[in-house]
Image (tube, rainbow, N blue to C red):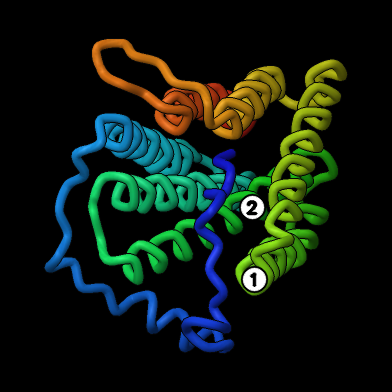
């Protein structure tokens, strides 16, 4: 999963007011007339790889939706397809934030929407894992709780930027929980595709570690910083997750 952008936490109460509806309206009032493309090579590759990640996530979302031939796995498909969709939205917004030079207020609003998308991605991700581990009833029961928890953590970090690490811990715990769950299901043979899911989550954890190491950079024809490398690795993780999900849904 993609780690929320450090250094971009904005206090909605201080800048846009404390009400969610006011924040949402303010965020949508974006004027792109003054935007221009970044000249920074690393930011350019970060934006391009963000687009690749967005296409992979949106493609995965549509593939899950189109591949379900029966109705028994509809809720599972809906949870995971939506999670992939929010990840794609976050990556698309990341491409805008990294690839364009925008007014600071616009930049801040984009990051707020991006982080909200990631919060929903993590919440849906956990709900999908619970579904596979304990069944549909448990997955649907925990879904609204996880959505509220994700938005609650996000709201707290936006209101009090100093506790941003809490959300990072939340995301890390979600990945570790998922890894343990799919290793368990794979060893027991209880879920088709669980091994692919475990590999995909392992790669996602590796990707998150790469993104957290801001000193990492690589030049292969073009210059890549830690964000660009993260995006490429995360795409590989998504492919394994998608293969595992398709196996579990279509068997």
Q: Tag 2: Cα neighbours inside 10 Å, few (<14), some, or many (≥20)?
A: many
User: x, y percentage for residue 74?
Assistant: 58, 50
From the viewer's perspective, tell me whether residue 107 is left or right of residue 207.
left
Asked whether the beta carbons under mark 1 and mark 2 sit within 8 Å of each other, the answer is no
Q: Is residue 101 above or below residue 152?
A: above
Q: Residue furthest top?
A: 220
User: x, y percentage for residue 232?
Assistant: 42, 24
Q: Is residue 16 above or below residue 227?
A: below
Q: Nearer the viewer, residue 94 or 174?
A: 94
From the viewer's perspective, tell me whether residue 202 is left or right of residue 136.
left
Question: Which residue corresponds to mark 2?
Answer: 124
From the viewer's perspective, tell me whether residue 190 is left or right of residue 58.
right
Residue drawn at x 44%, y 20% is 217
Callout 2: SS: helix
Residue drawn at x 76%, y 55% is 166
Residue drawn at x 31%, y 21% is 223
Q: Earlier in the sequence, mark 1 or mark 2?
A: 2
From the viewer's perspective, tell me whether residue 102 is left or right of residue 50.
left
Q: Nearer the viewer, residue 200 or 90?
A: 90
Callout 1: SS: helix
Q: Which numbered dot is residue 82? A: none
> Looking at the rendering, in which quadrant would you find the C terminus?
top right
Q: Is residue 92 above or below residue 149?
A: above
| Residue 250 shows up from this direction | no
Q: CA distance from mark 1 to mark 2?
A: 17 Å
User: x, y percentage for residue 82?
Assistant: 51, 52
Q: Residue 228 appears in which quarter of the rendering?
A: top left
Q: Nearer the viewer, residue 49 or 133?
A: 49
Q: Is residue 176 above or below residue 121?
A: above
> Looking at the rendering, in which quadrant would you find the N terminus?
top right
Residue drawn at x 80%, y 22% is 183
Question: Which residue corresponds to mark 1?
Answer: 155
């Amino acid at each position: 999963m993609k780690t929320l952008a450090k250094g971009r936490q904005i206090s909605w109460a201080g800048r846009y007011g404390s009400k969610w509806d006011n924040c949402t309206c303010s965020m949508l009032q974006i004027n792109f007339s003054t935007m221009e493309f970044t000249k920074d090579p690393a930011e350019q590759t970060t934006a391009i790889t963000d687009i690749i990640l967005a296409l992979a996530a949106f493609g995965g979302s549509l593939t899950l939706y189109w591949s379900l031939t029966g109705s028994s796995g509809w809720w599972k498909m809906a949870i995971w397809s939506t999670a992939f969709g929010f990840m794609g939205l976050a990556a698309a917004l990341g491409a805008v934030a990294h690839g364009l030079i925008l007014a600071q207020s616009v930049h801040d609003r984009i990051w707020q929407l991006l982080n909200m998308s990631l919060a929903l991605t993590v919440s849906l991700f956990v709900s999908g894992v619970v579904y596979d581990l304990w069944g549909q009833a448990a997955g649907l029961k925990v879904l609204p709780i996880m959505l509220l928890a994700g938005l609650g953590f996000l709201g707290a970090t936006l209101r009090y930027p100093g506790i941003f690490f809490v959300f990072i811990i939340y995301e890390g715990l979600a990945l570790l929980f998922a890894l343990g769950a799919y290793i368990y299901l794979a060893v027991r043979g209880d879920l088709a595709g669980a091994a692919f899911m475990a590999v995909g989550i392992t790669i996602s954890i590796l990707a998150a570690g790469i993104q957290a190491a801001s000193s990492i950079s690589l030049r292969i024809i073009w210059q890549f910083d830690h964000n660009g490398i993260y995006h490429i690795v995360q795409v590989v993780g998504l492919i394994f997750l998608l293969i595992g999900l398709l196996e579990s849904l279509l068997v």
